[in-house]
Image (cartoon, grey):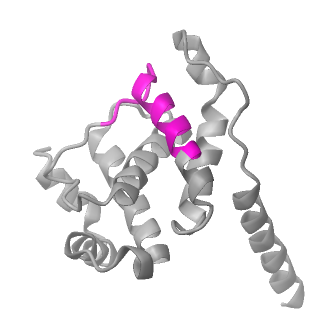
Amino acid sequence: MRRLFLVSVIALCGISLFGQEFQIPANYSFEKAEDYAVYEQDVINGINWLANTPIDQNVEKRQKVNAFLLQWMTGSPTVKIDVGQEVVNFLPNPDLLMAFLCGWTKYSLETKDFSNKIKGNTAGIENVIFVYNKNKKVIGKNKEVEKYIKLQSKGKLEEEIAKRIGQ
């Protein structure tokens, strides 16, 4: 039992340290379609860093990571994010919108499922919930995200998203 506890503590510390250590690639370039694949792991690492770093800390670095990720997301030949008001109804919070984009992107890259809108939206909302819960004191209460949290706790989030996007 002690060994399991020690391994868990070490793993959590490693995740915490990893979250603080992400560096935006130097001199990145997105000129050709092939350029995007080179940075896929950096994109995933950046997404993890944003999700695990409180939104009121490392603000300057957050802005740079956001810019890197947005540039990658908007030009990616594989990841196509569909942001619809029927699902992304928690605006105008830019941190939550970015969390949604990141969740969808990470899902697509990790699963290589680039066309499933239900799974992409669900992954986006799950990341919104994760970021919201970690930063609720800074963000403030958001009724729409709270509704998603209730749906998630009942195991009905994906079903509701499918209804909302008409699939």
Would residue 42 appear left or right of 68 to someone viewing this image? right
- Residue at the outermost front position: 60
Judged by its main secondary structure, the magenta piece is helix
| Residue 122 versus residue 166 in the image, above or below | below
Count the numbered circles shown.
0
| Residue 24 versus residue 102 in the image, above or below | above
Q: Residue at x 20, y 70 (%)?
A: 144
Quadrant (top left/top right/bottom left/bottom right) for the C terminus: top left
Q: Is residue 72 magenta?
A: yes
Q: Nearer the viewer, residue 125 or 27?
A: 27
Q: Nearer the viewer, residue 51 or 103?
A: 51
Q: Which residues are magenta?
A: 64-81
Q: Residue at x 25, y 68 (%)?
A: 156
- Image spot of residue 10 (x, y percent): 84, 74
Q: Is residue 10 magenta?
A: no
Quadrant (top left/top right/bottom left/bottom right) for the N terminus: bottom right
- Image spot of residue 34 (x, y percent): 58, 12
Which quadrant of the view contains residue 79? top left
- Image spot of residue 21 (x, y percent): 76, 54
Q: Residue at x 18, y 44 (%)?
A: 84
Which quadrant of the view contains residue 139? bottom left
| Residue 128 versus residue 7 in the image, above or below | above
Would residue 115 appear left or right of 77 to someone viewing this image? left
| Residue 167 versus residue 96 in the image, above or below | above
Q: Nearer the viewer, residue 143 or 67?
A: 67
Would residue 84 appear left or right of 34 to someone viewing this image? left
